[in-house]
């Protein structure tokens, strides 16, 4: 369970109404039962239910079960699509071990509004479900042009584009530095515009990648790209 409270020896962690409902109403836990907690900084702690009520409760930290660890410095940039598919991308990105998620507005972005708070709540749920001890941050919608203008010299960008001809794809995807910040960029349903492609091809830090000869939906492409990146550069 993710909590916004310090964790440590003898810490008493208060529960919100929603957390109490989940633990005692849905999961049917009661006083004395064990819960694993994380807050993104103190690792994972095992805690016992000390008080259980309808509107709240308290968990008493007992022992640390995992030290704090962080995923690689990997950010997923994607153009938001339909609600359910955007939710899917956020959930899978958390499971696949990104540190940050940034929805980007591109020339052909389908949806120009994102509910950052909703997506962040999905990220919390996904982190709880997959046993992570951190929750990736979901940023507000950013403009792709601005993201590229601010791109640090030492960071690499895996630029996923179905329109790459074979010779444009870097054959040496595994040859870039590992211990630098990385981004993965997935375009919208309409793909990238010619101007965006020109900008991305002209950028020294951009690594164009084609994920096979078929056109993947953006959500499939995100999972495929994350898998390839983790296989090549992940721990
Ligand atoms: N514009 C395309 C079309 O309608 O022909 C489709 C874009 S695709 C649905 C959405 C995004 O997924 C693309 O912008 C790209 O980032 C990624 N993508 C899909 N298939 C890909 C592939 N085979 N290789 C690399 N990226 C791919």
Image (tube, grey):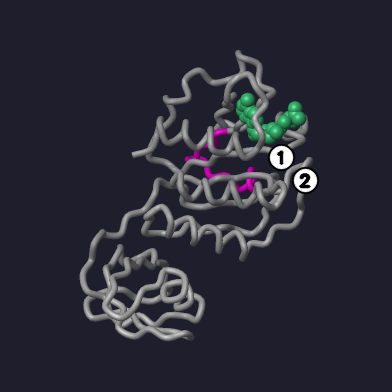
Left or right relative to 225: residue 87: right
**Marks 2/1: CA distance?**
7 Å
CB-based contact (under 8 Å), mark 2 and mark 1: yes
Left or right relative to 118: residue 193: right
Q: Quadrant of the N terminus?
A: bottom left
Residue 4 numbered tag: none
Q: Which residues are magenta?
A: 147-158
- Mark 1 residue CB less than 8 A from any atom of ligand 1: yes
Query: Dot 2 corresponds to which residue?
Result: 110
- Let me know if residue 148 is in the magenta part: yes
Residue drawn at (65%, 30%), measured in percent from left and top? 216
Residue drawn at (63%, 18%), measured in percent from left and top? 213
Other residues around mark 2 within 10 Å, as few (<14) / some (14–19) / many (≥20): some
Left or right relative to 102: residue 44: left
Query: Dot 1 corresponds to which residue?
Result: 188
Number of disc labels? 2
Q: Position of residue 127 (x, y in %)?
A: 44, 57
Residue 235, quarter of the rendered image: top left
């Amino acid at each position: 369970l993710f909590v916004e409270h310090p964790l440590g020896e003898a810490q008493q962690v208060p529960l919100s109404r929603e957390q109490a409902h989940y633990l005692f109403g849905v999961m049917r836990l009661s006083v004395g039962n064990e819960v694993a907690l994380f807050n993104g900084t103190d690792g994972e702690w095992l805690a016992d239910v000390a008080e259980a009520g309808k509107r709240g409760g308290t968990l008493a930290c007992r022992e640390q079960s995992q030290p704090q660890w962080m995923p690689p410095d990997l950010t997923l940039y994607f153009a938001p699509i339909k609600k359910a598919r955007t939710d899917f991308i956020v959930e899978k990105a958390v499971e696949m071990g990104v540190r940050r998620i940034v929805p980007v507005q591109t020339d052909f972005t389908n949806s120009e509004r994102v509910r950052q708070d909703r997506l962040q709540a999905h990220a919390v749920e996904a982190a709880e479900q997959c046993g992570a001890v951190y929750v990736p941050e979901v940023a507000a919608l950013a403009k792709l042009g601005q993201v590229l203008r601010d791109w640090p010299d030492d960071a690499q960008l895996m630029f996923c584009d179905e329109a790459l001809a074979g010779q444009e794809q870097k054959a040496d995807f595994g040859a870039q530095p590992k211990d630098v910040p990385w981004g993965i960029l997935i375009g919208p349903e309409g793909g990238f515009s010619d101007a965006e492609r020109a900008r991305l091809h002209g950028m020294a830090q951009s690594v164009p990648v084609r994920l096979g000869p078929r056109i993947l939906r953006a959500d499939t492409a995100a999972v495929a790209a994350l898998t390839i990146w983790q296989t090549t550069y992940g721990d």
